[in-house]
Amino acid sequence: MGRFGQWRNPVEAGAGGSAPRTLFEAVLVNALNPSPYLGWALVLGPSMLAAWSERPSYAVALVVGFYGVLVATLAAFILLASTARFLGPRGRRALIGISVAVLAGLGVYLVASGLRGFAAA
């Protein structure tokens, strides 16, 4: 069932019927995800090398700052998402509706921005 289907007919927590994922599966999915490799190859790697050539402590600060913000943000998101179970079906439906609206708005903005850039070229 897609997100819209969940919004119309929310499934109660624990009623999904899917088996819990193992740590091995989570590690495998993260190891095969190309995002970290692309991020390091295209953004973080060159930035770290430029910072290292200026001063090694800048490169260390870049990496520590990046991963510190990443871990703190993910921890905050996990804590926030874990409170959704206390909202009940109606509250979860509202959160799904809000996320759909935000993602649709972002999609419209990105398409419009791309079309403006294409028209300007």
Image: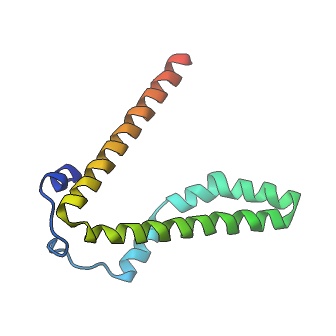
Vertical position of residue 15 compared to residue 53: above or below: below
Residue 86 at what x, y percent from top left?
Answer: 26, 71
Q: Compare residues 118 and 107 and report the one nearer the observer.
A: 107
Residue at 81% across, 62% down: 58
Q: Percent position (x, y) of residue 98?
A: 31, 49
Q: Indicate whether 47 appears above or below 66.
A: above
Residue drawn at (31%, 43%), measured in percent from left and top?
Answer: 101
What residue is rendered at 55% in x and 62% in y?
A: 36
Q: Residue furthest bottom?
A: 23
Q: Residue reaching furthest left? A: 9
Q: Nearer the viewer, residue 35 or 13?
A: 13
Q: How many marks?
A: 0
x, y percent for residue 3: 23, 53
The residue under the point 87% across, 62% down is 55
In the rendered image, which quarter is residue 80 located in? Answer: bottom left
Does 119 appear above or below 69? above
Q: Point out the image quarter for the C terminus.
A: top right
Instruction: Indicate the position of residue 9 as horizontal and vertical percent values.
Output: 12, 56
